[in-house]
Image (cartoon, rainbow, N blue to C red):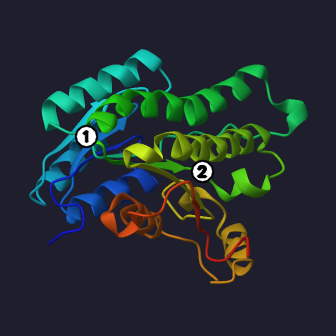
Amino acid sequence: MKLLEGKTAIITGASRGIGKGIAQVFAREGANVAFTYSSSAEAAAGLEKELTALGVKAKGYQSNAAGYEEAQKLAEAVLSEFGSIDILVNNAGITKDNLLMRISEEDFDKVIEVNLKSVFNMTKAVQRTMLKQRKGSIINMSSVVGVKGNAGQANYAASKAGILGFTKSVALELGSRNIRCNAIAPGFIETEMTARLDEKTVQGWREGIPLKRGGTPEDVANACLFLASDLSAYITGQVLHVDGGMLT
């Protein structure tokens, strides 16, 4: 029996990087996957095909989770197409890094909107369905930066720290209905975005991590799989660090 057999998952921001890794691992474990993407229709179509080939139902939706109405419509569309919503992974996120003195109001607002407000929007959108089902697992993607802060990322750190407070509050509110809510705090994860960085800089970061390597999208996806599955049935309100020991 696969760990997520017969369950339906919504994963936001899944056309590449960590989100794509989560979608692949979930589908391999039997989950039907509804995922969102913002602009890369070609990548989304490729992922849809790849997941469907694993014998599950998969569909990509172009949707902006930062829009409240869009999130509501997405949840309705997924429910009518898939019949249930058992897992929500709030993974969509952006960065607009700069020193505080150089961050514009617009760049602050945008990062909060896409990273934090989207978590509120999507959680609200699936809440009614999960309450009716009396079960569900919500997984919010935070970051080590949300736990310890980082120079040049005040907006990003604020958004990711906000996710932690939101996660714990939702866990307290919805626990009596058997709906769990946890967060994952990834460290340095190597994706196509980090591949563009200077190799020497990246190697320096790796050296500073106890496990001496960057994480992979699959490392994060496996932690998501645990929190999405019944293996973690008695775990809620927690922050799981997937950082190679970076914050130890």
Picture disc at residue 48:
none
Residue with the most extreme bottom position? 211
Number of marks in picture: 2
Q: Amino acid at mark 2?
A: Ser
Point out residue 220 in the picture as x, y percentages from the top left corner.
Answer: 47, 64
Instruction: Report if residue 40 is visible in the image.
Output: no
Q: Is residue 228 left or right of residue 110?
A: left
Residue holding disc 1? 133
CA neighbours of label 2 inside 10 A, class few (<14), some (14 to 19), many (20+): many
Residue 77 lies in quadrant = top left
Task: Give the distance between the C-alpha atoms of the residues marked 2 and 1, in whole angstroms.
Answer: 26 Å
* Circle 1: residue type: Gln
Query: In screen coordinates, is 130 left or right of 143?
Result: left
**Left-right relation of 22 to 152:** left
Q: Is residue 147 visible?
A: yes
Give the camera-side residue of 88 and 245.
Answer: 88
For mark 2, give the secondary structure: loop
| Quadrant of the snapshot with the C terminus | bottom right
In which quadrant will I find the N terminus? bottom left
What residue is shown at x 60% (from left), y 47% (from top)? Answer: 168
- Residue 163 percent coordinates (x, y): 62, 43
Residue visible at 11% across and 57% down? 53
Q: Nearer the viewer's eye, disc 2 or disc 1?
A: 1
The residue at which mark 2 appears reads as 142
Which of the 4 quarters of the picture holds residue 94? top right
Element on which disc 1 rests: helix
When asked about the image quadrant of residue 189, the answer is bottom right
Q: Position of residue 73 (x, y in %)?
A: 31, 20
**Residue pictured at 38% horizontal, 63% vertical:** 233
Q: Residue lying furthest right in this view?
A: 101
